[in-house]
Amino acid sequence: MPEKDAYTVEPWCVREPELRLDVLADTETVFALSNGCLGLRGTLDEGEPVAQRGSYLAGFHELRTFEYPETAAGDPQATQTLVNTIDGTFVRLLVDGHPFDVRSGELLDHERVLDLRAGTLRRRARWRTPDDRVVEIESERLVSFAHRGGAAIRYSVRAVDAPVEVVLQSGLVANAQLPDLPPVPSPDDLLNHPLVGCEHRASGTRLTLVHRARRSGLLVGAAADHELDAPQDFEVHAESEEDAARFTVTGRLETGAAITLVKYLGYAWSGDRSLSAVRDEVAAAVTAVRHTGWDELLAAQRRTLDEFWESADVEIDGDDELQQAVRFALWHLLQATLRAEGRAIAGKALTGTGYEGHAFWDTETFVLQVMTAVRPEVTRHALGWRHAILDKARARARQLDLQGAAFPWRTIAGEECSGYWPAGTIAFHVNADIADAVIRYVDSTDDEEFARTTGLDLLVETARLWMSLGHHGRDGAFHIYGVTGPDEYSALSDDNVYTNLMAQRNLRGAANWAQKHRDSAEALDVGDDEIASWLDAADAMFVPYDEDLGVHPQAAGFTDQPRWDFAGTPEDHYPLHSHYPYFQLYRKQVVKQADLVLAMFLRGDAFTDEEKARNMDYYEQLTVRDSSLSASNQAVLAAEVGYLDLAHDYVAESALADLRDLEHSTADGLHLAALAGTWIAIVAGFGGLRQVDAVLHFRPALPSRLQRLCFRMCFRGRLLRVSVEAGTATYEVLRGEPLVVLHEGDEVELTAGVPVERPLTPREERTPPRQPETRALGRRARPPEAA
């Protein structure tokens, strides 16, 4: 962590008031722009200094072969890795022959602002050249929400105190070198030099590069076109070579005069279409962006965001830092998903190459839980991607000698990319997480067309997996042995509670929908006997319980294992997996991330209030939060059982994961699920939201520091606003037909434009449990009376 925060705390932007080279990699991530299809890291316009360049296209990847000392049946043979494609962000500036570099001359002022309402990244700098000339530089960039392969940069230079000779170089660069990488590619260096040139062109104001990934064979193209507002005597020149193309502008600026260059970018890639088809698509993309023009691109960004914030905004009184963080989280969730449209939503989105750009269960359990409530069409598209890789999941199941579909633990294109068996392949709960997202989406939207097609296909094939993976034991119960739940510090467990309860929901959902959509089910060869077997398994699902301790073991036998020696573990030995063998972690009571606690949130109907409180107390002392996925779920349950200030602490940990680099890994990309968890923790924690079938239940309560919470969400064609203040909650349908919700178990009838206020039942105050030694939460500031 830096000694002081890199960003100011403001409600609608993230501002870096001075350039911080010590956290350059982090700011490149935080200031990344994307639309779900195209992502650009927030690098400096001139391209140097740089920590990690990144121009990413969703799904565009290279292959790397796994090397095993011994091969075994079912081992994936290769992994897919997101790669930097063709970088179009470069706009280099030379003033009187001196390249603008923040490390040379004198940087008089420097500020960058990520504007959460305008949808742009703005930069302003004043620079004194080595020969004492001052220029002002302003730039603004965006990745278009309207054009899925489009982006634009507006770059201006003004001579402040004397005439200057100016050169602007706008470029496209493939295989751009990262710091400390070898300049000459080698056969083993595919990820550093992943692209082979196919075509390059420079004509007039337009530049084009088309390349092919060395091993995956995917084609990618990028084009840049330019508009110039400058004195008439400025000269222009365009040139290209295999890995680079440049558009150069040269001339003299008199004192006070300025030059402005607008750069329009278009991208496309394909694994199926020809070189000429990709080239034409790129030409069409950049032509469309230029035709739209800078002013309309800005206006379209604002229209999209105005619409988004109308349905998604969260207002918080009493914690300005959290207010900024939740909007930052929602902004990046929109960026990560809006135009993904049939491509995977990665754990780091398109902000870095952490986790190799893979998608996990995080998408369905965290990201889509939020997007279903604020932008439900995103969820439809995302689940459509899962459906598109269904045949690959079926083939993976056959490879594992299972029925149905076995969705990959981590992937880009649909094949399993986890070479680590215990924490990868056998984390079968990903199937149930997909099914849960399917059920939640249809319950939230009443999208029956999706339900009888894509949704039913996914539910049926995931249900079939559980029937071949589990079995009815001699006790008559249905057991699922040898799996890994959400907690990656436990593996090869029997009857993991989270997995079993989510599989139970999966089986019941599949049976319900197959009975409701008989024709579609028959097309999948689903008969009455199979439906009956799903219901039998669901009704007989085994959920272990430790009678002696009065808690649910995370999995059978977990509470019988010895506890981890937390007192003897130094603070600098976290995360544990970086310092201790997994063998030691697997055989002890220590939890990386919320597992049983997550089960109590997503399957709260399976636990009594008393069981939730006892389980929360027990697992709070074992959970070390070595995963950013943990804090949000702990926040939800802490609020539910009455630890509201503890929940506030957990919300902040999830919310500030990247703005304060709490995981020390923001440089590799955002923690998208933790950002989604911020909304979940606030709305499900303090708002008390639970969706049971197709009914919204609310049980709001605020921690001592917060005076007010207001959030909006979409549900079955309505736009709903919920406001919570001390002692009261107010519900209002802002748009749509009347709606009935439950407030603390009582029905509330809502009509558009008529707010309804209800009193809150005070929560019983309980002394919260302690976290493991050296893993205590950072405390939120308390009002004097609560200190």
Image (cartoon, grey):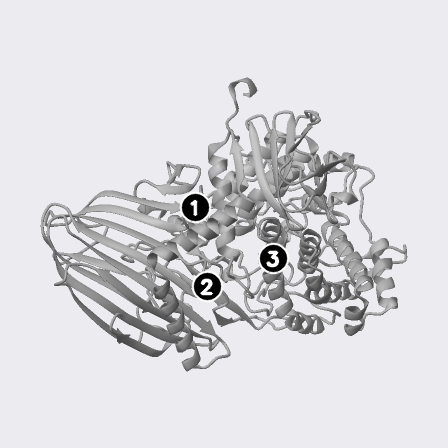
Comes first in the chain, label 2 or label 1: 1
Q: Position of residue 749 (x, y in %)?
A: 72, 38
Q: What's the residue at 11%, 45% (across, down)?
A: 161
Q: Residue at x 40, y 77 (%)?
A: 280
Where 402 falls versus 145 (above or below)?
Answer: below
The amino acid beneath tag 3 is Thr
Q: Is residue 227 above or below residue 318?
A: below
Helix, strand or loop status at disc 2:
loop
Horizontal and vertical percent position of residue 631: 59, 41
The image shows residue 390 at horizontal and vertical percentages of 66, 70
- For label 1, the residue is 117
User: As shown in the figure, which amino acid type bears the numbered disc 1?
Assistant: Arg
Question: In this figure, which residue is indicated by the disc labeled 3?
Answer: 379
Quadrant for the N terminus, please: top left
Disc 1 on helix, strand or loop? loop
Foreground residue, 130 or 573?
130
Instruction: Give whichever of discs 3 and 1 has the lower sequence position.
Output: 1
Can residue 303 be spotted in the picture? yes
